[in-house]
Image (tube, grey):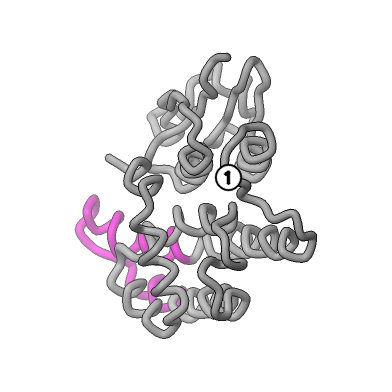
């Protein structure tokens, strides 16, 4: 059986989420570089894999798939290894809820509104958009509180075992906590601090750390 192929770039939050899922399942894979920010956009043949020109895309034994949530669920349900979705329907719904929160609200705020403005953009243009950062800080706090409230005193975001929700969130928190504002905000949520300490120390996180 051929290795799964992940198409994308290691700097991508969503590519990392897919890679984290494969790593946690113990599945070997190949990362096929695709840079959607290259001049002229992604290669034209890539649009046959992903008509919207985003990353990641995925292939396994000729089966092609895009959209991160679809890919990670497919990986969890297709390959052997630890289950990353609960069998209990209420817990599974909670996993999907946290993933949706991260996609619908947290991603643009934590990654683009704070990390990019405070860390990435200044490294390229020499300054940050302070007004945009200030605008996003209370929104970031809302995101953290929502996830913290759902987590309560559990070990992981949705209970006592690691799930796709943790992997989805971890790739975003990895960037968010590179900003001093992120490291300050998370201190208000001790359960998230403890969660991140456990999460950041996992071999899967080290294996998928962005190099660019």
Q: Secondary structure at mark 1?
A: loop
Q: Is residue 4 left or right of residue 195?
A: right
Q: Which residue is mark 1?
A: 82
Q: Main secondary structure of the magenta part?
A: helix
The answer to whether residue 165 is magenta is no
Image x and y of residue 76, in percent: 63, 40
Residue in view at x 61 percent, y 41 percent: 72
Please state if 207 lies on the left or on the right of 45 as rendered.
Answer: left
Residue 82 image point, x, y percent: 58, 45
Residue 117 shown left or right of residue 113 in the figure? left
Quarter that holds the C terminus:
top left
Where residue 14 appears, as percent x and y from the top left, is: 51, 45
Label 1 Cα neighbours within 10 Å, binned few <14 / some 14-19 / many ≥20: few
Segment colored magenta: 110-136
Residue 126 counted in the magenta span: yes
Q: Which picture quadrant has residue 162?
A: bottom right
Front-most of 91 and 103?
91
Position of 28 relative to 44 (above/below): below
Residue 159 or residue 114, whichever sits in front:
159
**Extreme residue toward the right, this view:** 89
Q: Quadrant of residue 51?
A: top right
Residue at x-position 69% and y-position 58%? 96
Asked whether 206 or 154 is in front, the reply is 154
- Asked if residue 89 is positioned above or below residue 78 in the image, the reply reads below
Q: Which residue is at a point 69% across and 38% down the rendered structure image?
A: 77
Q: Position of residue 166 (x, y in %)?
A: 53, 58
What residue lies at 24% left-to-right and 58% top-to-bottom? Answer: 122
Q: Residue furthest bottom?
A: 188
Image quarter where the N terminus lies is top right
Q: Nearer the viewer, residue 38 or 141?
A: 141
């Amino acid at each position: 059986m051929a290795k799964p192929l992940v198409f994308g770039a290691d700097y991508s939050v969503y590519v990392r989420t897919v890679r984290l899922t494969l790593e946690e399942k113990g599945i070997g894979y190949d990362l096929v570089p695709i840079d959607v920010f290259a001049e002229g956009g992604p290669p034209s043949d890539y649009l046959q894999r992903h008509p919207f020109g985003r990353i990641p895309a995925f292939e396994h034994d000729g089966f092609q798939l895009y959209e991160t949530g679809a890919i990670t669920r497919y990986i969890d349900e297709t390959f052997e290894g630890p289950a990353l979705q609960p069998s209990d329907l209420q817990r599974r719904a909670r996993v999907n809820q946290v993933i949706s929160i991260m996609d619908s609200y947290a991603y643009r705020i934590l990654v683009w509104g704070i990390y990019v403005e405070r860390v990435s953009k200044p490294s390229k243009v020499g300054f940050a958009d302070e007004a945009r950062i200030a605008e996003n800080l209370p929104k970031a706090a809302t995101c953290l509180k929502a996830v913290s409230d759902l987590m309560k005193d559990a070990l992981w975001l949705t209970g006592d075992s690691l799930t796709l929700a943790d992997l989805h969130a971890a790739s975003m928190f990895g960037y968010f906590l590179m900003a001093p504002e992120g490291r300050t905000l998370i201190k208000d949520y001790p359960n998230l601090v403890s969660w991140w300490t456990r999460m950041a120390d996992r071999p899967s996180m080290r294996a998928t750390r962005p190099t660019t």
